[in-house]
Image (cartoon, rainbow, N blue to C red):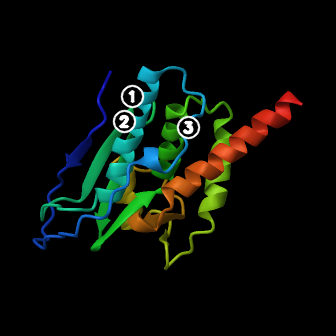
Amino acid sequence: NITNHANDNNINDNNDNDMALPIPQYTPIRKQVSTSLYIRNNEEMHDSLNQLDDLHFFLKTAPVQWSSYQLMRRYYLNNDLGFITCILWNQLYYITGTDIVKCCIFQMEQFGRRVTQRKKFEEGIFSDLRNLKCGQHATLEQPRSDFLQFLFKNFCLKTQKKQKIFFWFSVPHLKLFVDALERDLKREKSHQN
């Protein structure tokens, strides 16, 4: 079993400015979300909660204490989902919609739920992400922009089509997950009736 950990992907940059930020307040996810969802035994629950805490910690602190040559910091989820990445571009920190979806899928799995209709699941999250506005929560990148090309070359995106790239601290990860979980439970319930 591979332990989740942040993996600094140090890519050289000519920018020598250190981007030291204060360490944000961290509240373990187990204090924020009910732990009674479909986890089968105490050992699995403990392991899942630790993995959720690790992910939540990364989402809160990834942009902190970067070296001057660093352009991205990665976090390993699992073999199926791979990595999510915090990207530094033009003095701002970003996350892609693809990585936001991976975070939600990972959290669902840690709660003992398999995403069976992945396309519908992704559509729901991308629908929620439409509420995050360009300029305030994201930047809208034109097709094959330098930024999209960089993200694509570093396996952060599936396509270089016109899309939003989200400011790191503007993404309400927990709310996105809870909304996705509610949709999944409603979908499951409607199929049982």
Q: Residues within 10 Å of mark 2 (few under 14, many from 20)?
A: some
Q: How many marks?
A: 3
- For the residue marked with disc 1, what is the amino acid? Asp
Q: Which residue is mark 2?
A: 50
Q: Are marks 2 and 1 in contact (CB under 8 Å)?
A: yes
The percent coordinates of residue 82 (x first, y second) are 39, 36
Q: Which residue is mark 1?
A: 47
The percent coordinates of residue 163 (x first, y second) are 53, 63
Q: Which residue is mark 3?
A: 108
Residue 86: numbered disc = none
Distance of label 1 from label 3 (alpha carbons)? 14 Å
- For the residue marked with disc 2, what is the amino acid? Asn
Distance of label 2 from label 1 (alpha carbons)? 5 Å
Foreground of the two, 22 or 164: 22
**Of tags 2 and 3, which is closer to the observer?**
2
Q: Is residue 70 left or right of residue 16?
A: right
Q: Is residue 153 above or below residue 143?
A: above
Distance of label 2 from label 3 (alpha carbons)? 14 Å
* Quarter of the image that includes the C terminus: top right
Of callouts 1 and 3, the N-terminal one: 1
Residue at image position (59%, 61%) is: 129
Residue at image position (27%, 62%) is: 63
* Quarter of the image that includes the N terminus: top left
Q: For the view shown, which residue lies furthest in the left direction?
A: 16
- Dot 1 falls on a residue whose secondary structure is helix
Q: Is residue 95 above or below residue 116?
A: below
The percent coordinates of residue 8 (x first, y second) are 21, 48
